[in-house]
Amino acid sequence: MNQDIVNFVILPLLIFTARIFDVTIGTMRIILVARGKKLIAPLLGFFEVLIWIIAISQIMENLSNWVSFVAYAAGFATGNYVGMLLEEKLAMGIVGVRIITARSGHNLIHFLKEKGYSLTYTEAHGREDEVHLIFITIKRSKLKELVETIKNFNPKAFYTIEDVRYASNGGMEIEKKPIRLFKLRKGK
């Protein structure tokens, strides 16, 4: 095989791919550390650094190969993007949602209760009018559905979403399932 093809095509593609993997793993590791997952985060860290060492060793052996530098940087950027997409798809953890309705929130509150959401609400004073302040803690996987419901009932409602590291089970159904990054099929 032509050495130029190896140096300027194959090697940069391998470096690019390695960086995608190690940065994606790193993104997931950081998220898991923030959520207090003490067992899986160090394991991901091991593979993240192992892949990084392999990629950087190839860069150091080929310091005159500018295409490898570009592949390294592009792999880093792409790995960040892929990591964020993966984290979004996995929708791990729970979130706290605070909703402030600009008009009466009774219909929204009633609908959310009927749908089984555990919530707390109170009447409050807004800048100009009376408002309802609604607090909900839910699984992150159900967030999209909740936001759509809020927008349907009150498109001008103000809401904030915050990651919750831990919540006691005070009436909310929080599943305590282990985080699985990959699903294994039985019998294979």
Image (spheres, grey):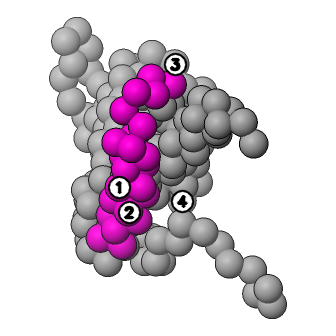
Q: Residues within 10 Å of mark 4 (few under 14, many from 20)?
A: few
Mark drawn on residue 155: 3
Q: Residue sitting at 51 percent across and 42 percent down?
A: 15
- Whole-percent x, y for residue 103 in the image: 40, 20
Residue position marked by numbered label 1 in the rendering? 53
In primary-sequence order, the first of circles 3 and 1 is: 1
Assess whether residue 43 is covered by the magenta stretch. Answer: yes
Q: CA distance from mark 1 to mark 4?
A: 49 Å
How far apart in space, not on screen, are marks 2 and 4 (Cα)? 45 Å
User: Which residue lies most toward the right here?
Assistant: 187
Q: Amino acid at mark 3?
A: Pro
Q: Which residues are magenta?
A: 41-67
Q: Which residue is mark 4?
A: 116
The label shown at residue 83 is: none
Q: x, y percentage for residue 77? A: 44, 30
* Left-right relation of 169 to 2: left
Label 2 near label 1: C-beta < 8 Å? Answer: yes
Q: Name the kind of residue labelled 4 in the image.
A: Gly
Q: Are marks 3 and 4 in contact (CB under 8 Å)?
A: no
Would residue 19 appear left or right of 38 to someone viewing this image?
right
Residue at point 54%, 66% (across, down): 181
- Identify residue for label 2: 50
Is mark 3 in CB contact (under 8 Å) with mark 1?
no
Dot 1 or dot 4, earlier in sequence: 1
